[in-house]
Image: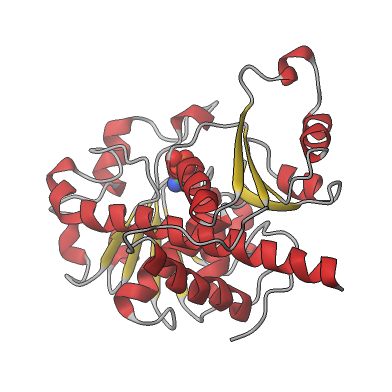
Amino acid sequence: MGEWQRKHLLGLKDLSREEIEVILNSAQAFKEVSEREVKKVPALRGKTVVNLFFEPSTRTKTSFELAAKRLSADVVNFSSSGSSLFKGETILDTLKNIEAYSVDIFVLRHSVSGVAFYLSQRTTSSVVNAGDGQNEHPTQALLDMFTVREKLGSLENLKVAIIGDIYHSRVARSNIWGFSKFSSSVYVCAPKTLIPKYFDNLPCKITYSLKTALSQAQVVIMLRIQKERMKERFFSSQREYVKYYSLNEENLKFLPPEALVLHPGPVNWDIEIASSLKEKVSNLILEQVSNGLAVRMAVLYLLAEKRSYEVID
Ligand code: CP
């Protein structure tokens, strides 16, 4: 197993396959901690983790908080509402002021692509990107990959279909970078208006046909239609979108029966996935959520370990 050398986790684009494996192997060990009666280890005792969330979140925020607590770190949850941002303080000044409390790791979610990188260049703390605009959401892709590896035993040479609102999805980008590093073929599928032109240059294949995407896929990642980010119309009607791109009983026949159906959540039932499939797909979607905790424990642990070496050096 390789060693973790990075100060920050900003995305999967720049990680090697070996670095992804270090995180996934470490997450495997941490998954066992959450299955114990006492779900706590002292690995991050004396460390401080601050969750800086400038956008709503249920899964990511909760699991980072729980991950830090299960590692025995001190955790602060900063919420932009009610903060001095409303008095005009910049995000950098906000971070610098909180950093003054000797913070080890900032976990950052923001609506603007590139903010995690921008702040990582200006802080002595480590930064974990918990989703920045339409750029990357590395820990979501890592938990998706962890779930797939656990179920299929490997991430190699798979056909992975990512279907839905590709345009606004940081999850799609992180999964494209992640799975392609294991020689898997990643297909993105959506109406043409929901696939930006620059996807031609990413390591993925583009299709507008759900049948083509589903056929012979081992993994399907259904993506949420991000209505809150749509300032213009991307398809003529929801009914039309559902007809061609929703996963339902009828088009499920194109998918091999053993294929895994994932969704990062929250799910818009009857838009991305028919509610008649709820019973069939919900267990795995909730397993993704549980695995997110192990993956985030691994990420916090590896970043904190790296910081400790730096202090010793
Ligand atoms: N998948 C995901 O990022 O969910 P949250 O927005 O609830 O964190």
The answer to which image quadrant residue 209 occupies is: bottom left
The relative height of residue 110 versus residue 24 in the rendered view (above or below) is above
Q: Position of residue 55 (x, y in %)?
A: 57, 32
Residue 189 in the figure: left or right of residue 170:
left
- Please state which of residues 184 and 114 is positioned toward the viewer in this rendering: 114
Q: Position of residue 37 (x, y in %)?
A: 31, 59
Q: Position of residue 153 (x, y in %)?
A: 35, 82
The relative height of residue 133 versus residue 150 in the rendered view (above or below) is above
Quadrant containing the N terminus in the rendered view: bottom right
- Please state which of residues 55 and 222 is positioned toward the viewer in this rendering: 55
Can residue 207 be seen by looking at this rendering?
Answer: no
The relative height of residue 52 versus residue 216 in the rendered view (above or below) is above
Residue 227 in the figure: left or right of residue 48:
left
- Please state which of residues 248 and 130 is positioned toward the viewer in this rendering: 130
Residue appearing at x 75%, y 66% in the figure: 308
Residue appearing at x 52%, y 57% in the figure: 296
